Image: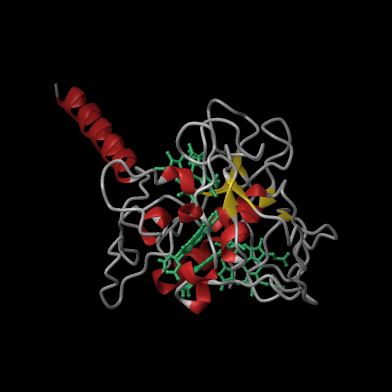
């Protein structure tokens, strides 16, 4: 009986943890449809600001937002950045590129508008005015990615001349053995594939640190969109109080 109880306790704990990781958009800074004054009712199509079930752009994950230019960016570079890549991010780096479709501050439209037969509706347009806080507009000029934490590169802990102590990537999924993540105390920080679900999951992207629709509430990170003092939201993958996330990866710093 005691054993059964402890198994049940563990099960409840696991379920509890899983539930706290439920992803929602409503009420977060990514509730972009509300910011566009499309209303606050239950009929509002929040997900359509980024996804469509049919006739999308062909990008993962059922991407619904179109932008002409820019199609590539100048990436972070430094004398000590060792995992550097010569290739710029492009649409295959979806977990960075898709963020930049909005966070570059350049206007974009939907591919497939809600309702019968995609009828263009300017309410779904995105432009720089929706990036109210200047820090959320990462910019679209050549220097755009030079002043951001490096992204769009192949994660390889063996390439680290300065001995940051980066962790080896680990298998992350029972259903897809290719899927890998950096598992820190506050992570996991997923790595992405540039070639669908068959290639190596070794790409370090914006979404390695950020969960775009995650509003898990834990110390150092609050889903309070009212922004009470001392709270973070930032859609982070982990609690960054005390720079905990940074040290999760840069173990020796
Ligand atoms: C602000 C843009 C945005 C909105 C709004 C949005 N998503 Fe996403 N979604 C993304 C991006 C970017 C990714 C890819 C990043 C990643 O894999 O973490 C993604 C990935 C996904 C995935 C695949 C990975 C996963 O987490 O399961 C699903 C499923 C998904 N979204 C469903 C939804 C649903 C349902 C809604 C509406 C409640 C929604 N999304 C609203 C941007 C958005
Ligand atoms: C459809 C457009 C859109 C897409 C796509 C999008 N965002 Fe955002 N994001 C926004 C808007 C709008 C805000 C609110 C900006 C503001 O308040 O200044 C925001 C805010 C944020 C914030 C700040 C949240 C806070 O607590 O202040 C983070 C972090 C963020 N986005 C990360 C990402 C990442 C990472 C991706 C890609 C995985 C992404 N976003 C994709 C529109 C988008
Ligand atoms: C190495 C982890 C990491 C990566 C990679 C990363 N971010 Fe962040 N981001 C953070 C942290 C941590 C914060 C919170 C910073 C703070 O406390 O002011 C943040 C904050 C933000 C904010 C809010 C800025 C503000 O001051 O309000 C936006 C928007 C954002 N990130 C978007 C992105 C986008 C887009 C990418 C990819 C180009 C990206 N991030 C890549 C860790 C990261
Ligand atoms: C998910 C893992 C991860 C997280 C979280 C993370 N980093 Fe990094 N960071 C890396 C990797 C990998 C590199 C590339 C190192 C290299 O190739 O030299 C890097 C590069 C950097 C660089 C540039 C190093 C150089 O030599 O030019 C700085 C600075 C940095 N990170 C600071 C931070 C800070 C500050 C935080 C917390 C806000 C943070 N990182 C969070 C993995 C991470």
Residue 192 versus residue 236 in the image, above or below: above
Residue closest to the far left? 1
In the rendering, at what x and y percent does residue 136 appear? 51, 71
Image quadrant in which you'd find residue 64: top right
In the rendering, at what x and y percent does residue 62 appear? 57, 37
Q: Residue at x 24, y 27 (%)?
A: 7
Taking depth in this image into account, of 230 and 244 the one nearest to the observer is 230
Residue 241 versus residue 53 in the image, above or below: below
Q: Residue at x 39, y 70 (%)?
A: 241
Question: Taking 218 as reference, is 238 left or right?
Answer: right
Colouring method of the image: secondary structure
Image quadrant in which you'd find residue 148: bottom right
Question: Taking 196 as reference, is 51 left or right?
Answer: left
Q: Residue at x 26, y 47 (%)?
A: 41
Question: Taking 180 as reference, is 158 left or right?
Answer: right
Question: Taking 72 as reference, is 234 left or right?
Answer: left
In the rendering, at what x and y percent does residue 102 appear? 57, 60
Taking depth in this image into account, of 120 and 16 the one nearest to the observer is 120
Residue 230 versus residue 61 in the image, above or below: below
Q: Residue at x 26, y 34 (%)?
A: 10
Taking depth in this image into account, of 142 and 206 the one nearest to the observer is 142
């Amino acid at each position: 009986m005691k054993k059964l109880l402890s198994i049940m306790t563990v099960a409840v704990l696991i379920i509890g943890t899983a539930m706290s990781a439920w992803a929602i958009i409503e009420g977060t800074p990514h509730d972009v449809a509300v910011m566009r004054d499309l209303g606050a009712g239950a009929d509002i199509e929040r997900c359509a600001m980024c996804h469509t079930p049919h006739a999308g752009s062909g990008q993962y994950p059922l991407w619904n937002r179109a932008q002409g230019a820019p199609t590539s960016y100048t990436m972070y570079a430094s004398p000590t950045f060792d995992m550097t890549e010569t290739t710029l991010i492009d649409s295959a780096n979806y977990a960075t590129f898709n963020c930049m479709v909005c966070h570059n501050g350049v206007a974009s439209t939907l591919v497939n508008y809600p309702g019968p037969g995609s009828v263009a509706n300017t309410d779904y347009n995105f432009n720089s005015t929706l990036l109210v806080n200047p820090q959320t507009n990462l910019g679209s000029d050549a220097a755009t990615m030079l002043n951001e934490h490096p992204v769009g590169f192949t994660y390889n802990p063996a390439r680290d001349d300065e001995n940051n102590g980066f962790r080896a990537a680990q298998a992350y999924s029972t259903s897809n053995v290719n899927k890998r993540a950096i598992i820190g105390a506050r992570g996991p920080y997923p790595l992405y594939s540039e070639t669908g679900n068959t290639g190596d999951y070794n790409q370090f992207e914006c979404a390695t640190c950020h969960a775009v629709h995650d509003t898990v509430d834990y110390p150092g990170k609050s889903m309070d969109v009212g922004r009470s003092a001392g709270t973070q939201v930032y859609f982070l993958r982990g609690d960054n109080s005390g720079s905990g996330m940074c040290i999760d990866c840069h173990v020796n710093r």
